[in-house]
Amino acid sequence: MEPILEARHINKSFKKPVLFHVLKDISFKIHKGEFTSIMGKSGCGKSTLLYILSTMDTDYEGELYLNNQLITGAERNELSQIRNKHIGFVFQFHYLLPEFSVLENVMLPAKKLAEKSPEEITHNAIEKLKVLNIEHLAKKRASQISGGEKQRVAIARALINSPSIIMGDEPTGNLDSHNADNVFTIFRELSDLEHLSLLVVTHDEDFAKKTDRIITMEDGRIIT
Amino acid sequence: MTNWGLILSIAKTHLLTKVKQTSVAALGVTFGIGAYITLVCFMTGLNTMLDDLILNQTPHIHIYNEIKPSKQQPVSLYDKLENSINSVHSIKPRLTQKKIHNALPIIDYLSSNRHVKAVLPQIKTQIFYIAGSIELGGNLTGIRPIEEANYFNLKDYIVEGSADALEQTDNSILLGAGIAEKMSLKVGDRVQVSPLEGGFFPLKIVGIYQSGIAEIDAIQSFTNINTIQRILGKANNYITDINVKLYDIELARPMAQDIEDQFNLRAIDIKTANAQFETGTTIRNLITYAVSITLLIVAGFGIYNILNMLIYEKMNDIAILKAIGFSGRDVQFIFMSQAIIIGFVGGVLGLLIGYGLTRLIDTIPFETEALPTIETYPINQNPIFFVIGFTFAMLSTFLAGYLPSKKAQKIDPVKIIRGQ
């Protein structure tokens, strides 16, 4: 199996307020269709690692490959395009644009990518909403729906450009157990049925146990 | 690659969901531009009117024979006293004629100059106005009425009668409004004038002249140049003053200098004659522009403030847009286009308000004794003011939007997302 995402010898230090070596020589691979979770105590650097992998944080040493292409050192605009096309994001907080409707939120990355016609994009977005059982919310404002629903909208948005990998930063951290299960089920299905790669940072041990692979971090190192 | 349709639709949604803030920002521009247009049109209208009041009647070059003591006294011509100190007390001017020597050839010569629009001879003299037992001192100026009306706006100051009547009627007079009032004379009456040399000449009043400057109206009257030559008993080459009007007022000074040197006459250009007046105009313009620019800058700061606030409010949105693949540039364009839309809408409204207000002011009656031809407040609706106003609206909103949007471009999404 070919790796979707590969990290080679990643090191990162925070210089402020004091010099702190947060990530120490991190190397691993994520394969296609793999559902991986990253666990570790608070402050072990797992979120920092995720943001480096997501290409939003460019201040690190080491090399990062996406689909076997080196993306370390690329221009910011290029990175924006890579995020747009290849990476889907789900955050702990829902992060929808509150003034836009649910449908518009989902369509936004596709419109940015502009590879498909507006009709196709609308059709795809409604398809994604249907898969997640929230197509009845399409016309509602993003600020008017519940937390669990928002998270599902966020997942639909992450899926709209058919990315190579979905990344989540505690996607269930702010949800009750029912909605958390719901989100996990969605992820599981995406991984099993559509062979999507997933990388999720979590605190939730139950959640992590149900994933294909757990990466455990401690003090800036991968220990398992 | 920039997807403008998408960027504009995001900007539009931001603006429409914050209608209150958007309209406050746009109104800031509207009032700034509206006030600028109103102020500039009104002030320049007023300035032009005041300028015209003086300048229209003033020739660009006024040529006359000045009575003054000779600069060179005979003693200084005497070689043997060259290195000694000479002092002549009580120098008096020499008696010379008032008329310009060879006036008619000079007029012909000046008329042939291609920069000259018109050359008009005048005869100025002191006379007494006599009606019954009343005798009033005053000035009578002999003119060519039709040309004077065409080139020096004389017709604007004839409140009754016309220049044509003065041209056509023999022994007629265009009487100053002040004199007419004092002597209770009206058009059609006769007034007797008496030159200093003596004699009485009855003249028919064919019009009333009112310059708006009371002191002038109380003494000044006009008559045909032939009539005055007859009154004074002079030949038809007796001319005391020559007024020159040029196409380009800037040439007045050098030309006046040339004429002085060439003909040994006194030639005063309009700028020298109205130096203090020019200063007044400059300062009024300066004040107008200072106030206008202040208004526009205040409007600009309003926009800057509101966009700054908007960007702080939209930190999360900016982070999420960047996370899902919008570049810093895209985000900057989103906020820039909001600023430009605010500037455009506010600017256009401001132009309309300014236009409306100036039209309104233009209809307000403004009647004053001093300005016989003015009926409403003067407005100068020069299109250039509207162009400047709109350009400034766009420019200031661009700048006011540029700085905050630059900040939005630099926002690090990781900090916002992790900070929550």
Image: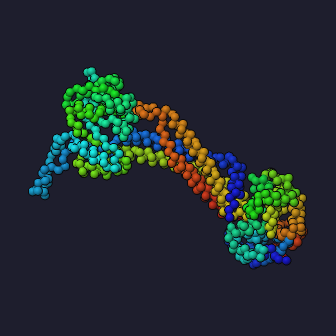
Q: Dividing the image into 4 quarters, which one contains the N terminus of chain B?
A: bottom right
Q: Residue at x 75, y 75 (%)?
A: A69
Q: What residue occupies the far top of the structure in this picture?
A: B132
Q: Is residue A220 left or right of residue B163?
A: right
Residue B307 vs A11, above or below: the answer is above
Front residue of A2/A126: it is A126
Q: What residue occupies the far left of the structure in this picture?
A: B80
Label tally: 0
Q: Is residue A60 visible?
A: yes
- How are the colours assigned in the image? rainbow
Where residue B160 appears, as percent x and y from the top left, is 38, 28
Where residue B257 appears, as percent x and y from the top left, is 28, 51
Q: Residue at x 66, y 63 (%)?
A: B329
Q: Residue at x 83, y 57 (%)?
A: A126
Residue B318 vs B280, above or below: the answer is below
Q: Is residue B112 left or right of residue B356?
A: left
Q: Is residue B312 visible?
A: no
Q: Is residue B91 left or right of residue B384?
A: left
Question: Which corner quadrant of the image does residue B403 belong to?
Answer: bottom right
Front residue of B159/A211: it is B159
Where residue B41 appears, as percent x and y from the top left, is 50, 43
Where residue A150 appears, as percent x and y from the top left, is 82, 57
Question: Which corner quadrant of the image does residue B143 belong to?
Answer: top left
Q: Is residue B287 left or right of residue A74?
A: left
Residue B333 vs B193, above or below: the answer is below
Q: Dividing the image into 4 quarters, which one contains the C terminus of chain B?
A: bottom right
Question: Which corner quadrant of the image does residue B411 belong to?
Answer: bottom right
